[in-house]
Image (tube, coloured by chain):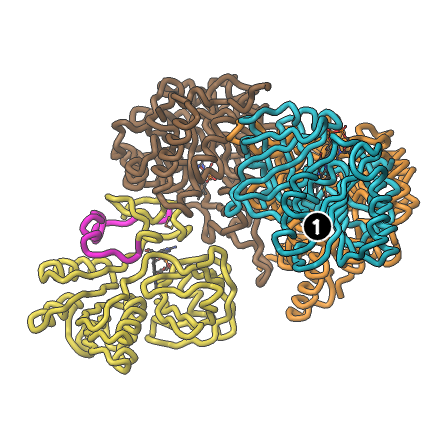
Chain colours: A brown, B orange, C cyan, D yellow
Amino acid sequence: MLKTNICGVEFRNPLMLAAGIMGSNASSMNWILKSGAGGVVSKSFSLNSHPGYVNPTTVAVEGGIINAIGLSNPGVANFKEELEKIERKNSVVIASIYGATPDEFSSLVCEVQELVDMIELNISCPHAMDGYGASIGQDCNLSHTIVSAAKDASDVPIIAKLTPNVTDITEIAKTCEDAGADCLSLINTLGPGMKINIDVARPVLSNKFGGMSGRSIKPIAISNVYSVYESVDIPLIGVGGIYNWEDVVEFIYAGARAVQIGTAIMDEGVEVFDHINEGLERFMTEKGFSSIDDMVGLAHREL
Amino acid sequence: MLKTNICGVEFRNPLMLAAGIMGSNASSMNWILKSGAGGVVSKSFSLNSHPGYVNPTTVAVEGGIINAIGLSNPGVANFKEELEKIERKNSVVIASIYGATPDEFSSLVCEVQELVDMIELNISCPHAMDGYGASIGQDCNLSHTIVSAAKDASDVPIIAKLTPNVTDITEIAKTCEDAGADCLSLINTLGPGMKINIDVARPVLSNKFGGMSGRSIKPIAISNVYSVYESVDIPLIGVGGIYNWEDVVEFIYAGARAVQIGTAIMDEGVEVFDHINEGLERFMTEKGFSSIDDMVGLAHREL
Amino acid sequence: MINEPKIVEITDIIDETPTIKTFKFDWNMKSLGKPNPGEFVMIWNFKNEKPMSIAQINDNELAITVKNIGEFTSQLHDLKIGNQIGVRGSYGNGFNNSFEGKKILAIGGGVGMAPINAIVSDLIKKGNKIDVVAAAVTKNELLYATSLEELGANVHHCTDDGSFGFKGFATDCTRNLLQDSTYDYAFVCGPEIMMKGIFDILEEAGISAQYSLERYMKCAIGICGQCCVDSEGWRICVEGPVFENDKINKITEFGKYRRDASGVKY
Amino acid sequence: MINEPKIVEITDIIDETPTIKTFKFDWNMKSLGKPNPGEFVMIWNFKNEKPMSIAQINDNELAITVKNIGEFTSQLHDLKIGNQIGVRGSYGNGFNNSFEGKKILAIGGGVGMAPINAIVSDLIKKGNKIDVVAAAVTKNELLYATSLEELGANVHHCTDDGSFGFKGFATDCTRNLLQDSTYDYAFVCGPEIMMKGIFDILEEAGISAQYSLERYMKCAIGICGQCCVDSEGWRICVEGPVFENDKINKITEFGKYRRDASGVKY
Ligand SMILES: Cc1cc2nc3c(=O)[nH]c(=O)nc-3n(C[C@H](O)[C@H](O)[C@H](O)COP(=O)(O)OP(=O)(O)OC[C@H]3O[C@@H](n4cnc5c(N)ncnc54)[C@H](O)[C@@H]3O)c2cc1C
Ligand SMILES: Cc1cc2nc3c(=O)[nH]c(=O)nc-3n(C[C@H](O)[C@H](O)[C@H](O)COP(=O)(O)OP(=O)(O)OC[C@H]3O[C@@H](n4cnc5c(N)ncnc54)[C@H](O)[C@@H]3O)c2cc1C
Ligand SMILES: Cc1cc2nc3c(=O)[nH]c(=O)nc-3n(C[C@H](O)[C@H](O)[C@H](O)COP(=O)(O)O)c2cc1C
Ligand SMILES: Cc1cc2nc3c(=O)[nH]c(=O)nc-3n(C[C@H](O)[C@H](O)[C@H](O)COP(=O)(O)O)c2cc1C
Ligand code: FES
Ligand code: FES
């Protein structure tokens, strides 16, 4: 009943781990899969290892956190060891990759595509170094070039992950679709935001700015999914502030075929996946839905 | 001690009412001034009357609300009657105006400038009709034209109110400064966001989309004030999620010379102004600050 | 109090008069909050959302009583049992319901009887002796009169056309009553022109009272400023809808003018 | 628990050993939360932010005990009384401190004595009989040994170079103790290589124990995944830093490898 299908990839339920949350080791991703997620997205990784920003890299704000971890990762060679250890049976494994040039993206695709079911392009991290992350996803030309390069190199479906921090997200969405993206996930963290400690009059994060995640970004994520659903024909994955099954239904009604969950794990533990699956199934039974498909985009009906 | 000065206009304290909150009548604005605000910004008004959107026009979300009131107002002729009745002694009165063309803005400026101390240009409402609000403030050329027109017509300082819903707010900020804005206020509501009611599978707001305000947008507002402070030389007014004196200090440290308060009134009542003034004065005394001036932009120090 | 609409099903519809219907729906007092008499809710019929007084506060159930006067209220009148509506609230500063063993006068005109019904039902249980002036244009528009009588209120019917009870306006009926009796306190709701008349009468008689006002509403949570009244700027949705007589004195627009959705006075 | 740094002033600094200092600061247990022994805090010196075990839980006061081993810890060692630091937490799954009237063995190596001090201080008050193995490379690096003795613990000093107490490693000292005595439960913190040795000894002796682990930390709130250990994926900052012996068995990387800030194993 909870099954969903994205670009021909079967998910046993619509819940995935979002990129960058407990996604650096095969061990933690296997734990998330055992906890009820239908799929996992890895931490974003690059060709070479990267230590990320100096701490503090996270700080709590109203309704969530802001983070500037800075895309730390051990590099693709090390990361492949982790990907190989993920239990792929009945689960969908998605690698999130990042880089600055089309070549970096296509090399990464070639390196890992055998080990995963789909590849997500992080062109949306709002606190990445210049030339990476949102510097790509905030520019239509760059987005087009990168997505095309990744798509050309890939045998598995390509997901472009979008940043909400643009004047018009539908423009970027359409560009990514044109460039060959098979699917879009949205949103990456919002802002960036900043928290200043007033006792010492300085930004808490060493990077000063960090992306917002958690409950408070949900209305923005919903709004973006809703808008993008009306502008493209490829499937959408909703991300941002999902804590319970009600939130998942809201995203599906807005137009998502599946969702990713990140910050909720901090507050609710890995149990959040099982809890949501239970609640979702109960809701669908009560309302008489027999598949996720029946629910996708319902909030767009003219009544 | 709480005095602040913006473009030569003296404020007895750095707190103002934000546009659109209890700002449609002289009566309610006088009440806000009696409650401790150093200034008030009126509801945004236009040449002709406008009923705004059909209800629901507001809905609660995590950490705030989303609204699409739709810039309802009785038109400038009626609004002037209200402006005339505001008690201006010791208080700063700011008219917020909106329109779609340079002519509309300059006519509005001419109509009201005698009655107010400053004029704020709403080029940032994220749920305005096409051609209004953020459709201007999301475009550098339009922003430049509108701000120039208003500035040319005005004898009082012009504040351009910025939207956070752009790829790069510093670009728009610099454009407004170039066009002659004397001051910038930021941020208008975020997003827009959306709330879908899952029992009936539809967006709650009649306009579907609405701007987010309240506690949850503060990190974005702080981050924008911080960035814009480093890009322009004109004074800044901070807005977005201010509930207590700590929030005000955070905005001042980020670079604001004054702040505006909106949604907090819903949760804390009009008493919020007096409470903040008291707390702020206590903090300044404890820390040994003798003026707001001493605190502006402190979080930018390299240490 | 909830600030996003809760979807409820209409469980019962009562045709009160040719123009007025009462709608009942379940309301979990524990999770959604228990309203006081005089408070109101925002009703969303998925086309528009408007304020309605709470007319009955029952056991995990609320009722609103709606007069069909325009597009929205006529859409509500088209609803059937089992249909859904969205409800948020309850909102506002309700009636003072702390009286016990007092002699009380309650005056309701037309659908203004809705909140009067809520406060009278409550105060009767608290051992107050209550005279109700139930006013309407004509006999078959009289609202809640019988049920309040059954509860133990002393109801003075009053119709403009004299088709039932006292012939004349609520003001005349009230003036009559005050010739023989006096009251510890009064509650008033009805058309503003009527309330203005009653206010003058009660002030002269030295009877403190609470009045429930109406103004155009958008947010109902005290933020948009749409419902603010001159000269104090009070919000009908927060400081009101119920005001004491000493505050009514400061609402200079009371009985004079109001503002439409744009804010234009009329 | 607080997830944004609270700025506190250093109220006292104790030079424990040539390489180790203790820093005290006020901590309002009511508003900030009362930590349990074994939990840790994130210390922000405005240049970096790193985890430190809570070494003392006093009356509205906490202390951390820091060994100078690199850039950050040497910056901490430069702090003076009255200087400010940011503190958030407390975090993690601490020691089980519910024992009463038991015979307990606590083993700390080097600055690993910090959390051992916290749990032993607590359990002594609860009437447990406690043997402590306090291990260090040399005499003047012995930490908390005297103060724990004064509290009533039976401290077995142990130095690698034999400059004080038992000559040899904590493992040897523990093996010795177990020849004459047995214990209801044990607590262990120190270099992982030491803990691995102790683990093998205690498992063989059939003594259940808790071990406090360290891994590179960024968020400390269970979100970034930096501190996850193989093969279960547990987060040292949430499921740890303290684990029971049966869980240690499932941490296959225990005593073998760890990951740096990039996630590269070493
Ligand atoms: C606190 C409060 C309690 C109320 N309680 C009741 C009640 O118990 N029963 C009842 O029948 N009516 C009640 N009303 C009035 C009710 O809200 C209006 O009758 C209704 O909104 C009319 O809508 P319409 O589309 O049918 O008529 P329209 O033709 O749209 O309007 C008719 C008149 O109703 C008023 N009105 C319209 N929209 C609004 C609005 N959004 N907010 C406030 N007034 C509006 C205006 O005065 C308008 O001139 C109450 C109003 C308020 C403010
Ligand atoms: C739960 C926990 C409790 C700790 N308690 C104490 C304590 O009570 N007293 C004490 O002196 N030390 C404690 N540490 C270790 C302390 O965090 C490191 O010694 C310190 O971070 C070293 O930083 P540095 O810049 O001085 O040295 P570096 O040269 O940067 O690092 C030396 C080693 O310290 C470790 N380290 C560095 N950065 C971190 C980090 N962000 N998170 C975790 N480990 C890191 C790494 O193993 C590294 O190889 C604890 C660590 C953890 C995880
Ligand atoms: C600590 C942290 C690290 C993240 N790292 C990544 C990342 O490496 N790549 C990426 O695409 N998104 C990253 N994100 C964004 C999340 O995948 C997600 O888009 C965002 O957090 C919103 O979802 P949430 O509110 O459920 O957390 C990160 C988020 C957090 C909080
Ligand atoms: C109900 C409502 C109406 C608003 N109307 C206006 C408006 O007319 N003009 C304007 O410039 N901003 C308007 N705003 C935006 C506020 O002035 C302010 O920028 C925003 O709400 C963020 O501040 P806050 O979090 O303190 O509310 C409105 C906000 C709300 C909540
Ligand atoms: S209806 Fe918005 S303030 Fe009352
Ligand atoms: S340090 Fe981030 S999960 Fe443990």
Q: Position of residue C151 (x, y in %)?
A: 63, 45
- The foreground one among D161 and D59 is D59
Q: Is residue A263 rendered to the left or right of residue B253?
A: left
Answer with left or right where residue D205 lies relative to residue A116: left
Q: Is residue C56 left or right of residue A100?
A: right
Specify the quarter for ligand 3: top left
Q: Callout 1: few (<14), some (14-19), or many (20+) C-alpha neighbours within 10 Å?
A: many
> Which residue is denoted by mark 1 in the rendering?
B261
Residue ranking furthest to the bottom: D150
The residue that appears at 82% across and 38% down in the rendered structure is: C259
Q: Is residue B239 visible?
A: no
Q: Position of residue C115 (x, y in %)?
A: 69, 43
Which stretch is magenta?
D240-262
Dividing the picture into quarters, in which one does residue A260 lie? top left
Going by the numbered disc 1, the residue's amino acid type is Ile
C5 and C62: which is toward the camera = C62
The quadrant where residue B249 appears: bottom right
Which of the pair B284/A297 is nearer the observer? A297
Q: Is residue C185 above or below residue C26?
A: below
Residue D254 among those drawn in magenta = yes
Residue D235 horizontal side relative to residue B84, left or right = left
Q: What predominant SS class does the magenta segment belong to?
A: loop
Quadrant of the frame with the C terminus of chain A: top right
The quadrant holding residue A23 is top left
Q: Residue at x 34, y 76 (%)?
A: D16
